[in-house]
Amino acid sequence: MEQTLSVQREDIPLLIGRAKEARKLIIDMAASPTGCHIGGSLSVIDLLIGAYAKHHHDPHTAIILSKGHAAAALYAALHVYGIIADNPAESYGAAGSLFTGHPNHKLPGIPFATGSLGHGIPYAAGWALAQKLKGTNGLGIAIGGDGELQEGLCWETAQIVQAQSLTNFVYIIDCNGGQNDGYVQDISPIRNLRQRFQAFGFVVREINGHRMEDIVAAIEPHSEGPVAILATTIKGKGVAAIEGKAEAHYAKIPEKLAHKWKVSLS
């Protein structure tokens, strides 16, 4: 049995609006002196907004961004939800700022610092196991990327999740098809993802990672096994000039261009 949705249909326009505001913040962070990982941040932001809409009020639930280079998206999501009061774009990447290039656990709403790819997945699994042992209904939610699946630790964690019957574990994969050096399909293709996760005992859901209704419906645990959400996304989503381009992985842009991109957000 799947749990009842905690986000109503009438909330969807609000969440879409929050995602748009968060995209503006990401663009502003790309216009900072250091720039940011804009492509993957824009692809994952809808998934973060959906996850926080449903679960950030539960103290027994942890949402962990394993693809930590997309910290700009995480900071933006936490800011639009009011979990972090300060505007991250005002000091992102600056010396002494808490808004570092990878998630900083000293900030509210970030239970673990992440950065080395693959590590956030076992953090979330460990959290889920702890909640199971304590008898709470808390979730461990990991948000990773498809390029990240080249890390063996992701699959080692899937084995442990299956062995421990962690039905309170949700793994969301931002399948934007890109990574640092190009396209996943050109570097180390990861085929048959549905079948791979099913072989580890996961309940697999495939969604449009930019359709908010699909996102909030998918981010639910299942009594028959851990959940893997394969979310098809577009790198650089919302900014036509960089959508789907591997070279949009990291960017430092002038403020004039940032203004243009924010005005044209789709």
Image (cartoon, rainbow, N blue to C red):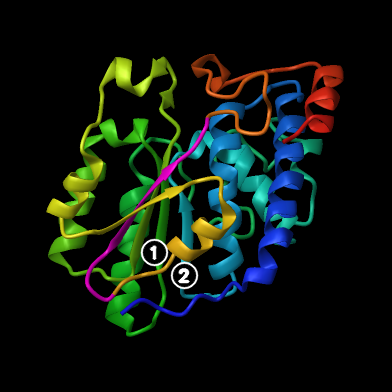
Q: Which three-letter amino acid code belongs to the residue tagged 1?
A: Gly
Q: In the image, is residue 249 above or below residue 113?
A: above
Asked whether the beta carbons under mark 1 and mark 2 sit within 8 Å of each other, the answer is yes
* Distance (Cα) linking label 1 and label 2: 6 Å
Q: In the image, is residue 243 above or below residue 196?
A: above
Q: Which residue is mark 1?
A: 140
78 is within the stretch colored magenta? no
Residue visible at 87% across and 18% down in the picture: 256
Badge 1: residue crowd in 10 Å (few <14, some 14–19, many ≥20): many
Q: Which residue is mark 2?
A: 61
Residue visible at 67% across and 40% down in the picture: 99
Q: Is residue 43 left or right of residue 170?
A: right
Q: Is residue 37 visible?
A: no
Secondary structure state at the residue bearing disc 2: loop
- What percent of the width, then of the height, locates residue 18? 72, 53
228 is within the stretch colored magenta? yes
Residue 228 position by quadrant: bottom left
First of labels 1, 2 by sequence position = 2
- What percent of the width, then of the height, locates residue 23? 70, 39
Q: In the image, is residue 54 above or below residue 43?
A: below
- What percent of the width, then of the height, locates residue 191? 22, 32
Badge 2: residue crowd in 10 Å (few <14, some 14–19, many ≥20): many
Q: Is residue 45 left or right of residue 94?
A: left
Secondary structure state at the residue bearing disc 1: strand
Residue visible at 47% across and 70% down in the picture: 61
Q: Which three-letter amino acid code belongs to the residue tagged 2?
A: Thr
Q: Is residue 71 left or right of residue 263?
A: left
Q: Is residue 196 left or right of residue 239?
A: left
Which range is magenta?
Answer: 223-234
Residue 26 position by quadrant: top right
